[in-house]
Amino acid sequence: MGEKKPKENLILTEDELEKNIPQNSIYDMQSQKEGELSIEETQTLISKEKKLIGIYDPAENGLDINMWSNSNGDQILNIFKRIDKLELSRDAEEILDVLLLTNAHYPEMNISKEQFLEIKSKWLIKRSNFDLIEKYLLNNEIINEHPKLTKHLVDHYLSQSDVEKACEIFSKINEPIQDLYLSKFNIYCLINNNKRDEAQLLIDLQLELGIADKFFNKKIDYLMGYNTEPATEVSEKTILDFHLSHRTNPEFKFEPKNTTSRQIWKYLSTSNLLDDISDIELTDIEKITSIEKATHEGNYAEKELFELYKRFQFNINQLLNIKESTKVLSRIETRALIYQGILITTEIENKLQLMNALKNSFKNDGIENAFNIELKNFLKNIEENKVPSNFTTFYQDNLGNEETEQANIKINNKILHQSKLINYLKLEKSKNDPTKDINDFLKKIKKDKKYFFSKKDVILVETFKSDGVKILEKYDDLYQINDSEIPSDIQIFVNSGDMAAALLRIVEVIGQDSLNAIDEDTLYFIISTLNQLNADPLRNKILFKVLPLKV
């Protein structure tokens, strides 16, 4: 071996480190320092493949531990590429959550374990259900396999100014952390929790590896008490850097701009570091523009933005002739004038016209979410039967259907798919046999020449048949089935035992639509597919969303 170089010549920048030092170096050295395992034992554990990573038992939804085993990676990746371009509805998201987070063996054909885990990570980041992410990461002890996902989780908590929650994640990790950013985050958390000796051990390890992050080290020196001078330098490179900038400067002050990241805006908001609306100059267009964007992103409350709009001064002529007046106003002044017009207008059609104009103004500037809650509050004060027909769609789309979502199921025994028969599909297994009830109902329908046998009725009967319920042959002529309604590629997946690919295609088919908005033909083939896959619990969850009458 050659002569060992002086330590100062081994110092690398963080970017150089990523290129020159193996990702598990910190892991290896920490194991040696702590005396937990030898390098060989550690590497054996790291390389040991985890066949099952998830949080749901397959039986919960009628799925299978081998549901990915027959999947072709090329097809899976292509379907995910298409799904990734969609804004999935909540119903589609829930099915995809179940599919990706059910304990099952990895697909092995034309796809690596790393590619498959990356799919899960990308989806969870896009979905950003942080409770789900935390459960997935910690239950499976896969922090090192999902560094991007872990960063997304702890950065989220830190952006909410919830240092305790962010650091709690690290306290639950039972293995040394390989990722450099997460390792630095862990050091900060140890200091924050008064575990300075443990923090110093990790700092020493980083120094031995030649890691040079002057900004981070300077902040840590201040927090450790090695340097009593406040570290006033501010960095927006990461949310951790920004938090350390705030934490180490008692006189911290920061003016966000349009280019400031959403996370930092959120941090400023949750840390009460944003300017008070009443202090903002109405002539500061750049500042107001950034506030509009921050409102769109949820970092300023809508009520604060609209309080700012109220401060604009308009004369009576401008308020009475809004359409003409806006032609000579800036976009911000236009929005303020329209908002004030909504407040003083009593005639319903004119009021709705102004609401629509304001919503479009926000939408045209890409900040439509800045006028969601206030718009809904306006609409709630208007009775639906008083809304002119040309504004019905606008009214319904923006008011939302929260009431329908929370509606109770009402039994209607005049219609097959809304009758008491649906109780046999409840998630808890019914101990009673529905054979007599379903055949009695069909007998009644056969006598009633006026009864229209809907596609949803067909879906319910076919579901019972799939579950082994004997339907008498004399009722077969009540309806006809078109066997070709299932898309050919989905049927091929079903026939080849590729459950996962078939379910992925169902997610893609549902796409942006809620299940209640899907046409009955599409619903029929979705349920037919689930019947063939024997995914009864998942099927029944869908049926309970679309079949019953809700009040």
Image (spheres, rainbow, N blue to C red):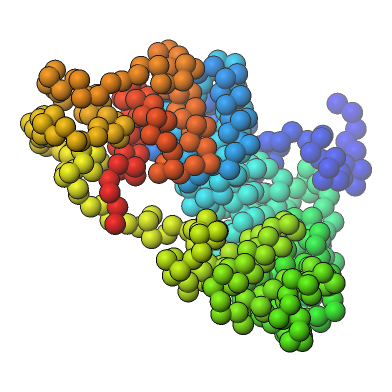
Residue at the location (74% across, 33% down)?
Answer: 22
Question: Which quarter of the rendering shows the N terminus?
Answer: top right
Residue 478 sits in which quadrant? top left
Number of numbered tags placed on the structure image: 0
- Is 98 left or right of 38, judged from the image as shown? left
Residue at the location (35% across, 19% down)?
Answer: 482
Residue at the location (90% across, 47% down)?
Answer: 8
Residue 199's x, y, as percent?
66, 57
In front of the other: 243 or 107: 107
Residue at the location (73% across, 75% down)?
Answer: 322
- Is 346 left or right of 532, judged from the image as shown? right
- Is 452 left or right of 147, judged from the image as shown? left
Residue 359's x, y, as percent?
65, 63
Residue 464 sits in which quadrant? top left
Q: Is residue 515 above or below residue 264?
A: above
Q: Is residue 348 above or below residue 397?
A: below
- Is 166 left or right of 70, judged from the image as shown? right
In the rendered image, is residue 3 in sight?
yes
Q: Is residue 337 above or below residue 487?
A: below
Residue 185's x, y, as percent?
67, 54
Residue 453 sits in which quadrant? top left
